[in-house]
Image (tube, rainbow, N blue to C red):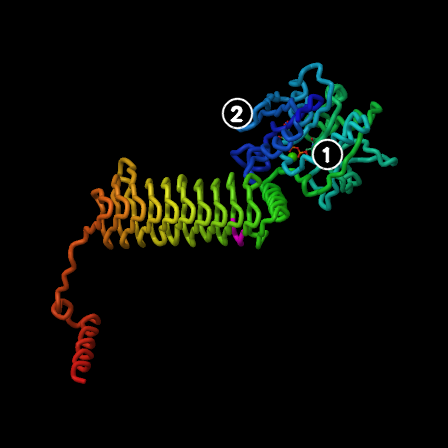
Amino acid sequence: MTEQNLAIVVLAAGRGTRMKSATPKVLHRIGGRTLLGHVLRSAESLGAELVRVVVRHERDLIVESLADHPGVVAVDQDEVPGTGRAAQVGVEALPADFAGDVLVLSGDVPLIEVSTFQSMLDEHRRRGADATLLGAELADPDGYGRIIRGADGMVERIVEQRDATASELAVSEINPGVYVFRAPALRDALSRVGTDNAQGEMYLTDVIGLLRAAGGGIAGVTAPDAAAALGVNDRVQLGEAARILNQRVIRRWQVDGVTIQDPQTTWIDDTATLARDVTVLPNTHILGATAIGEGATIGPDTSLVDSEVGEGASVRRSDVTLAVIGAGATIGPWAYLRAGAELADGAKAGTFVEIKNSTIGAGSKVPHLSYVGDSDVGEGVNLGAGAITANYDDVHKHRTHIGDHVHTGSHTVMIAPVRLGDGAKTGAGAVIRKDVPAGALAMSVAPQRNLDGWVENNRAGTPAADAVARARRAEKQADGE
Ligand code: UD1
Ligand code: CA
């Protein structure tokens, strides 16, 4: 859907001083997206054709982040400070004859849902208002601008915390910083905003009082969920916003048929997807573009980043990044799957197993204490405990090819580049430096020699020698009986 009568201006030029960060405030992340990314995502789902993001502080980094949002245009704020000036340069960057509605959003208010914007627009248009405000009732309104209403209950103006009187500070209805304006009314009021306030800035909030004084209609919509009004100005609020978003995401998946055993210790990014009947056990992080198939069990103590998990798979106490796990595969406990690990259906990566940049065929197992890197492993393979693909010769990485139904003995080291043909086997402790033909058994360990009596001859008087002596007596006694 496209809305030709709607423009969106997102304010993102501020310093974000209270974050105490090298990263611009609106590029801090919660739930898998930047704060600005959340705002733009909601803006985009409204279908506005004209979206402007006002930038100044760390503008290059912010402009770079807009690459993910085609059609969104950055506009530079000049040295005049304040949200009013930011809105003004945003509006000036719209076509001069644009006379529709302007939704002004703050890049640091990430949790407001698109349905709230939509009800603001509906109310604005129904009432033919010059401006429509969002209001939120907060138990602790500290730090926010307060919405001041007249005796008739109508909105009169907004006062900033720093400019407020004691009785104004007692008002609990706050301004979340989201507004709809009729474009001509906004242009006109902004041209009359001054800087006579505690911060010496052009306040966008002054527009409300100016419009009201000029007889304009101001409509109001109350935020359905006051927590969504949270503005992120410091790391405490960043943590709080992350928590609120996480709760919302978890609830959404629960409603969609996902069991989440312990929502308190589960973190799911807004960008991940989970199918029905997935079970998520405690202390689990499902991050980035991760997608989990129906009936899979994830956790406890598991982290999945940008990975795919097939139907019915199980991932326990493991760390998985940029990996693909097939249907019915079992991972962990304590597996580490890194970029490019691709396990086919029914495969297994067990305990203390690390796999990167490798394909593991259907039903193949890497059950214990192994490193598989830069390898292609066929189907029905069993790599015995302690299998190592030595893929790095200090200069280059090389591949290991392991055919179908290969079984390696415990502690086999495969020195890449090397191939093990279909059905091949290796003896325990084998060091495979040469290709193994299909069907061959490869052994590289020298035959065992036992030097009888070595301990008595060379380690007399040690506990080991005493133990040998006891063993000899026991043997004699057994012989005597
Ligand atoms: C603003 C509101 C306040 C409201 C609060 C809600 C004003 C004057 N105050 O206060 O009423 O309760 O948001 O969260 O508007 N920005 C620019 N250019 C600037 C200054 C700021 O683009 O020159 C951007 C910031 O990047 C930010 C947004 O505007 O995304 C809000 O700025 P901020 O300084 O955080 O305003 P608050 O003090 O939170
Ligand atoms: Ca703010």
Instruction: Return the residue nearer the eye: 1 or 210.
Output: 1
Residue drawn at x 80%, y 35% is 148
Numbered marks: total: 2
Badge 1 or badge 2: first in the primary sequence = 2
In this view, the residue farthest toward the right is 152
Picture disc at residue 160: 1
Local SS, label 2 = helix
Mark 1 C-beta closer than 8 Å to ligand 1: yes
Q: Is residue 16 something that shows in the picture?
A: no
Q: Residue at image x 28%, y 55%?
A: 410
Give percent across and percent down for residue 279: 54, 52
Closer to us: mark 1 or mark 2? 2
**Beta carbon at label 2 within 8 Å of ligand 1:** no
Residue 52 at x, y percent in the picture = 63, 23
Residue 243 or residue 69, whichever sits in front: 69
Residue at 64% across, 28% down? 11
